[in-house]
Amino acid sequence: MIMPSSKKILKCVALASLGLNVSNLLGVAAFSSRAISQKSFRIAPRTTSQLPVAGEMQLVNRNTRLFAVDNDDPNPGGLNQWEDENDRKKSFNEIGFFDQVQEWFASDEGKEDVKTYTTSLAVALLLRLLIIEPRYIPSLSMYPTFEVGDQLAVEKVTKRIRPFSRNEVVVFNPPQAFREIVGDSSRKAKEALIKRIVAVEGDTVEVKGGKLYVNGVMQDEPFTAEDAAYEFGPVLVPPGDVLVLGDNRNHSLDGHIWGFLPAENVIGRAVFVYWPPWRVGTNGMY
C-alpha cells in the first residue's frame, strides 16, 4: 500500500517530465522558424508586380504552385507568345506542283534518288551502247525462227573479237543498196534489219532447185520455212562482206535482191529471245 506522501512525490515527478517535453517541442519549433527565415529564397506574394533582379532565381507562388523563374529568360512564365517557324510553312500538299518538285530536289531524299536514277540510267545506256541491246521483230521475214512481236537480246561485243560464221543470226544497219530499193526517205531505210548469214568472204554461193549451195555443197537448213522459189548465183562473196538471207526465203527482202552486206554494218549477234515467255530461248540461233 502506497502512502499519501508517496503519491504527492510521484505526481510532482510526472508534472516535471511533462513540462520538460513541452519545452523541448517549443525549442524545436523556434529553431525551425529561424532556419526558414534564413533561407536564400523568398516567397513572392500573388499580387506582386515587382520584377526580379537580373540573374536572381525566385520561387513564385501562383495558384498555390511553386516554380522557378529564370530572370535571364526573355519570355518568363512559359511559351505563351512562342511561334515556331515551321508553323508558318505550308504543307507539301498545299504548294504547287513545280514548288513540290523543287522542294523534292532540294531534300536529302530527292538528292539521293536523283543520284540513284542517274547512275542506273548511265549504266543502262552504257550496256546498250557497248554490250547488249533489245530488238523487236516487226515482220515474218525470219519465220519460223522468229515471229512478229518477239523480243530478243543482241550482244555487241564478240563482233570485235571473232569473225562471223555461217548460220549466225545478225542485226545490222541496211546497206546503201537496200535504201535505194525502198527509198531513202522511207522509214524502213532507217530501221535495223535481222537476217541469217549464209556465206562469208571468199565463199561461192548459189541457190538452185530451192536449195542453198556454198562452195558447191548443199546446206542443211532446218530453220527455213520452205524451199526458195528463185534462182541466185553463183557469186563470190567479196572481202569484208557477208551474204544474208531471211529464213522465210520467199517473203524476205534480203541479199538475193540487194546484194552483199558490209560486215561493218553489223550491230551484233542475236543471242536469245526473252519475250514472250513461252518463246524464251535460243531455238534456231546458231
Image (cartoon, helix red, strand yellow):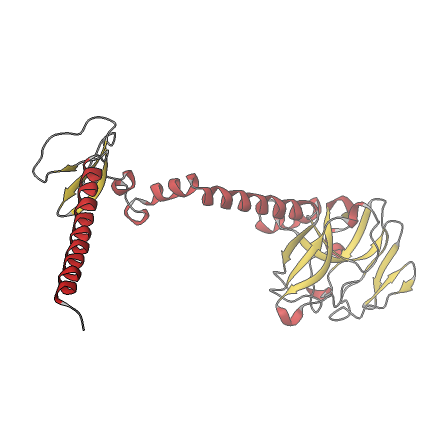
State which quadrant residue 13 falls in: bottom left
Q: Examine the rendered structure and indicate whether residue 278 appears above or below residue 154.
A: below
Residue visible at 55% across and 46% down in the picture: 116
**Residue 103: horizontal and vertical position, in percent?**
38, 41
- Residue furthest toward the top? 54
Give residue 47's position: percent from left, percent from top: 7, 38
Q: Position of residue 152 (x, y in %)?
A: 66, 60
**Circle count:** 0
**Residue 279 or 177: which is nearer the viewer?**
279
Name the quadrant containing residue 17. bottom left
Q: Is residue 11 visible?
A: yes
Q: Nearer the viewer, residue 111 or 206?
A: 111
Q: Nearer the viewer, residue 191 or 259?
A: 191
Residue 68's place in the image compared with 171, above or below, is above
Which residue occupies the foreground of this view, 1 or 230? Answer: 1
Quadrant location of the C terminus? bottom right
Image coords of residue 109 (percent x, y):
46, 45
Viewed as shown, does residue 100 lie left or right of 152? left
Q: Quadrant of the N terminus?
A: bottom left
Of all residues, the one furthest to the left in this rendering is 47
Residue 51 picture quarter = top left
Query: Would you say residue 77 is visible in this rendering?
Result: no
> Residue at the spot x=65%, y=44% of the render?
126
